[in-house]
Amino acid sequence: METTTQSQTYIAKTIAGLEEVLAKELTTLGAQDVKTIKRAVSFSGDKKLLYETNLWCRTALRILKPLYSFPASTNDQLYKSIYDYPWENIFSVDNTFSIDSIVNDSSFSHSHFVSQKVKDAVADKFRSINGTRPSVDIENPDIKINIHIYKDQCDVSLDSSGESLHKRGYRVAVGLAPLSEVLAAGLILLSEWDGKRNFIDPMCGSGTILIEAALIAQNIPPGIFKKSFSFMNWKDYDEGLWKRIKTDATGKQKIFDGLISGSDIEARAIRNTRGNIISANMQKVISLQVASFDEFKTPEGGGVMIMNPPYGERLEQNDIVAFYKSIGDTLKKNCKGYDAWIISSDLNAMKFIGLKPTRKIAIFNGPLECRFMKFSIYVGSKKDQYN
């Protein structure tokens, strides 16, 4: 495996619609050869950058390190090419491991079969060297091997992240249909909030958008709460380098003196949010109130508002039209000077907001294709704002 300064290619996985945002994050961190691909971004860098991307990337789900590729159209080809690789240089027989396989348009029709075959080859290789083999742990493995087969071309990678990076580690309570931390951070970055103006989520649920905003405003890395990453179990793990990166991150934190506030009509949601905010140590930065959107007092001075209103199965069809109309009425009445961003998978309901969006961005929330729309609520007329 590479030394600290040797450059190699990596792949950062993300949510469909956040590829460009992630590419910008990686470029800011110093990544080279940055290229967007479907639900991912490829880039090159050294071991230090690999560690930094796991710590700092707000919109990455996981960072893969490609090892090698080979043609695989038969069981024997797959087994032999995996068996021949020097896995003993990557990890120890004392480590647990798991295989994550994705198969598309291939001679292999089942990803589970591929995972089983790869697992056998890796285990047999260790047994041939040591007389014993590492154990498989599907839930919490030390080493995660990623297999991707497309048109009988097999790409083998190591997952450097382990548990998905969207699982930050601060969430102790969740409500109904919680928003992924990666998606929440992506929405904030797409809104181009400067981290200084007022920031509001008037339908905050379990508080994920608010907490991600607080992390951004204070320049705190999202990976700071995670206890472990898979790269820590690789044989070339540099503990001193990792400690220096984390120390450096602490020195980059900023003091935020703006206002981040949230509300929800459900008292239980606010209790959940408060628990998560305390877990993230953000109670001095975020203020909360139990209130419906039309009762919520928006801070003066304008700013950015992001909301994830109920849609689809979360709201009865009969109530959707009235609910979205009320959102538009409240925006026009109470939110002058704000850029209001709304994410929803119900494009028909969004029409009843009664305002013309100034931006529309396609993005996925899990399996749901959504639109993230910006409504600029001007003080006075739009013409006055322009002048």
Image: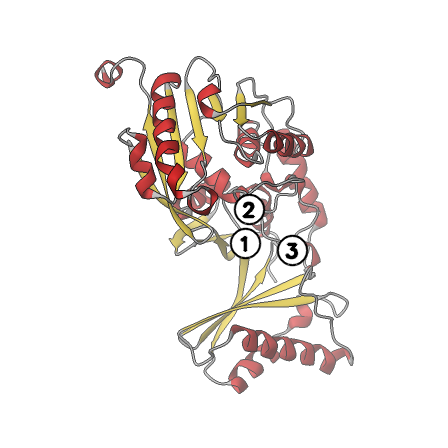
- Does residue 57 appear in this view? no
Image position of 330 with respect to 83: above or below: above
Colour mode?
secondary structure
Mark 1–mark 2 contact, CB under 8 Å?
A: yes
Circle 1: residue type: Ile
In the depicted structure, whether residue 103 falls above or below residue 185: below
- The residue under the point 64% across, 67% down is 98
Mark 2 residue element: helix
Between the C-alphas of marks 1 and 3, the distance is: 10 Å
| Circle 1 residue | 63
Percent x, y of residue 381: 25, 15
Image location (x, y in percent) of residue 162: 63, 56
> What residue sits right under mark 2 in the picture?
53
> Along the line of sight, which residue is nearer the eye, 97 or 270?
270
Mark carried by residue 327? none
Please name the residue that numbered disc 3 is placed on. 231
